[in-house]
Amino acid sequence: MNTSEVAKLLGVSTSTIQRWVKQLELPMERNERGHYHFSSEDIELLKKIHEQLQNGTLIQEIVPLKEKKNPRKGAVKAVNDNQALEKLYSKVSELESNINSKADSVASYQLLQHRRELEDLQHLVKDLSQQVEQLQKQMNELKITSQMEEPLVFDHSKVKRKKKNIVSSLFGF
């Protein structure tokens, strides 16, 4: 059975089953995708754990009722030919060196590209600063010419204001 089927059988969520397996370090088998696969013995063990938890036992106090299973062992074909192994090592080394050289060339290309971008930005900043200087000179020249064109006023006497009529002051006209 898979995790969701066992969870339905016990009336708990799949994450609860997964948490019990992890916290109690239960040696459950996994399929080729890494999902838990529960045998009838495993289900009985989980039922006992569920009963203990229902009776108020803390999960830290639960001792697994089952001994650990031996981990699954896969069949590995023994390599009898050292030449094949050496050939494999040399191929891996060659691939690693190719990857390293490719990474170096990519990094060099990126550095050159960044350098070009920085140089372009420096030229742009230089051009902009020259334009700002020219604009400041033009502003200064305009200020000087506008000051020369303004008439000199020596009389600072008060300007007489027109008196408002009482009716217009009341109605805001």
Image (tube, grey):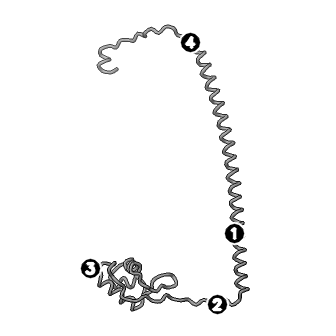
The residue that appears at 30% across and 78% down in the rendered structure is 58
Q: Secondary structure at mark 3?
A: loop
Q: Upstream in the sequence, badge 3 or badge 1?
A: 3
Vertical order, 75 against 147 (above or below): below
Q: Which residue is mark 3?
A: 56
- Characterize the local packing of mark 3: few (<14), some (14-19) or many (20 or more) Cα atoms within 10 angstroms: few
Q: Which residue is mark 1?
A: 99
x and y percentages locating residue 23 in the rendered image: 39, 78
Q: Which residue is mark 4?
A: 151
Query: Is 82 placed left or right of 5 in the picture?
Result: right
Q: Secondary structure at mark 4?
A: loop
In space, the residues marked 3 and 1 are separated at their CA atoms by 58 Å
Figure quadrant of the N terminus: bottom left
Mark number, residue 78: 2
Mark 1 vs 2: CB contact within 8 A = no
Q: Upstream in the sequence, badge 1 or badge 2?
A: 2
Q: Upstream in the sequence, badge 4 or badge 1?
A: 1
In space, the residues marked 4 and 3 are separated at their CA atoms by 100 Å
Q: Upstream in the sequence, badge 4 or badge 2?
A: 2
In space, the residues marked 4 and 1 are separated at their CA atoms by 79 Å
The amino acid sitting under disc 2 is Ala
Query: Is 11 placed left or right of 148 in the picture?
Result: left
Mark number, residue 16: none
Mark 3 vs 1: CB contact within 8 A = no
Mark 3 vs mark 1: in front:
3
The amino acid sitting under disc 1 is Ile
x and y percentages locating residue 159 in the rendered image: 43, 10
Mark 4 vs mark 3: in front:
3
Figure quadrant of the C terminus: top left
